[in-house]
Image (spheres, rainbow, N blue to C red):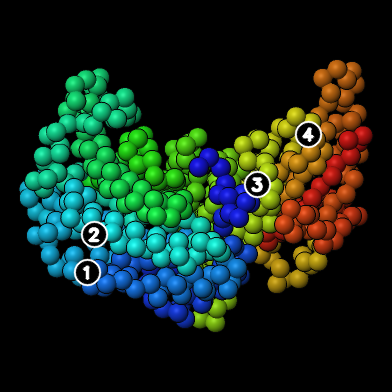
Amino acid sequence: MNGFLTIQGQPTLLLGLQTQNSTTGDPELLAREIAAVRLLGGNLLEAPVYWCDIEPQQDTFQFDSVKNLIDRCREAGLHLILLWFATSKNGHPNYAPEYVKAAPQTYHLAQARNGAHVASLSPHCEATLTRDQNAFCRLMAFLAAYDQPAQTVVMVQVENEMGLANTDRDYSPQAQAQYEAGVPDCLLNITLEDMGVTPEGNSWKSRFGRHAHEAFSACYHARYVQQIASAGKAIYPLPMIYNVMLGEQGIEEAGVNYNSGAAVGRVLDIYKAIAPAIDLICPDMYVPDRERYLRVCERYTRADNPLFIPESPSLGIANALNMMEAFARFGCIGMCYFGANYMLDNRGALLPDAQELAYSMRAVANVAPLLVRLRGTGNVHALVQQAFMEKQYLRLPRYHVEATFISACAERHGLGSRINPRDPENDDIFTSPGRALLLQTGEDEFYLSGAGVKVDFIKRPDPLEEDSYPHLTSRQSGTLNFLSVEEGHFDGDQWVVDRQRNGDESNFALFVHRGQTVRIRLNPHR
Ligand code: DGJ
């Protein structure tokens, strides 16, 4: 996959929520969580399928809960990503059937250096792989039969946040034998950053130095999911994704700060070489600070891996801001917040702490057709208010753009259209942290979508213009240089104008509140 997911012939931006872990067996909770997606204007639900639920006894299968998930999403007009909770749920085997859990002599746990068992099924155990793969294939066969015409299920996540905690690799006898067998040929041209050795030979140590154990663990986890994903695709070729508990944490040592064998940034090349059946390797993005957020986006955005974020916080402010950078700078093709239910109060209304995230999702959803059209063109910009920031400057070919964050300026005049900024109930629009997408759709045409931001466009001097100063300082080349300012929304690819802004509603500021979208046509003749 190298761009947006194509659904029924349409490249589609996926935006929505992931359910809580135990929702699939709880119809009432599922209804609440689907309602939450609709409240936010999303088009996607992510929900788990439990191995222990579909195969409660060995070789006895039931798909009622999966059918119910599909039916409810289909009714609600939502796309669905199924999450295969099987051998691994955050590295642990909680969702394996009892017949697997109760037979550790057949379905081995991984072992630490001292021989102690760790709370993960070993990725080196063929018996577990065979059973997991078999159940997964049964699931894919069910989907092919039940869902192929409607395609409510658009992707499947294989396992959940795999990897081994509290050990740098599996030391069980099978694992040890594979470690001693050396590095497979397909990894011989791969190097990892900061290995500390010049690679030679084919032992794990001589090729990957200080990251040898992690590389080995990644290789065999990748092999495990590859076998499951490829067998499933042979039955029903849906795109497959794989989510990752991030390695960009703390001192960045596998098994200490994160699970060893997870597809963390450092070992992505290993995963790509071993697991081509996985279409997208996806960061679970619980990262509040911008610097690390950008680093993670950068690592997971590759020509062979467009950025898809299957989990991110559903409360607070950081994600409401950082996500704009994912869409603008990294061409993010989809995003979910985790734990739909966490966003709602007992009556099903949005909690105050979820409000800013709801506005951000609305702002992004509002311009979905433009994000699809403009991906990779450099014409999507993020305006995001960082600490102490009052303004942000962008230099575009024809315009200086100066964004002012509304929460940082005292001036309240000219910021109202429909929402009366003088009503104290609307005070939030002056405290909302500023963030928006600015999308350039023509030389002199822009869309602004977000909250807490106003922008000014100042026409830049032509290089050969002798006397540009009067233009630069004239209001006609700045705040008044628009042909029209329209508040609106998209219906499919069609821009629909809800109302025109002019006079006081445009002559002082071109602004957005609470996830609004405006189309701004500037005057090329000033
Ligand atoms: C990441 C996991 O993938 C989710 O299933 C969930 O456990 C969240 N962490 C946190 O609640």
Q: Is residue 511 left or right of residue 346?
A: right
For residue 218, which quarter of the picture? top left
Q: Nearer the viewer, residue 355 or 333?
A: 333
Mark 2 vs 4: CB contact within 8 A: no
Q: Which amino acid type corresponds to the residue marked 2 in the rendered image?
A: Arg
Q: Nearer the viewer, residue 274 or 122?
A: 274
Q: Is residue 9 left or right of residue 184?
A: right
Please report the residue visible at 68 percent of the width from the left and 61 percent of the height from the top.
514
Q: Nearer the viewer, mark 2 or mark 3?
A: 2
Can you tell me whether the CB of the residue at mark 2 lies under 8 Å from the nearest atom of ligand 1?
no
- Upstream in sequence: badge 1 or badge 2: 1
Q: Nearer the viewer, mark 3 or mark 4?
A: 3
Q: Nearer the viewer, residue 237 or 262?
A: 237
Q: Nearer the viewer, residue 359 or 55?
A: 55
Query: What residue is pinned by disc 2?
Result: 131
Give residue 285's position: percent from left, percent from top: 44, 51
Residue 526 visible within the image: yes
Give residue 109's position: percent from left, percent from top: 15, 56
Disc number placed over residue 58 in the picture, else none: 1
Mark 1 vs 2: CB contact within 8 A: yes
Please, what secondary structure does the residue beneath circle 1 have? Answer: loop
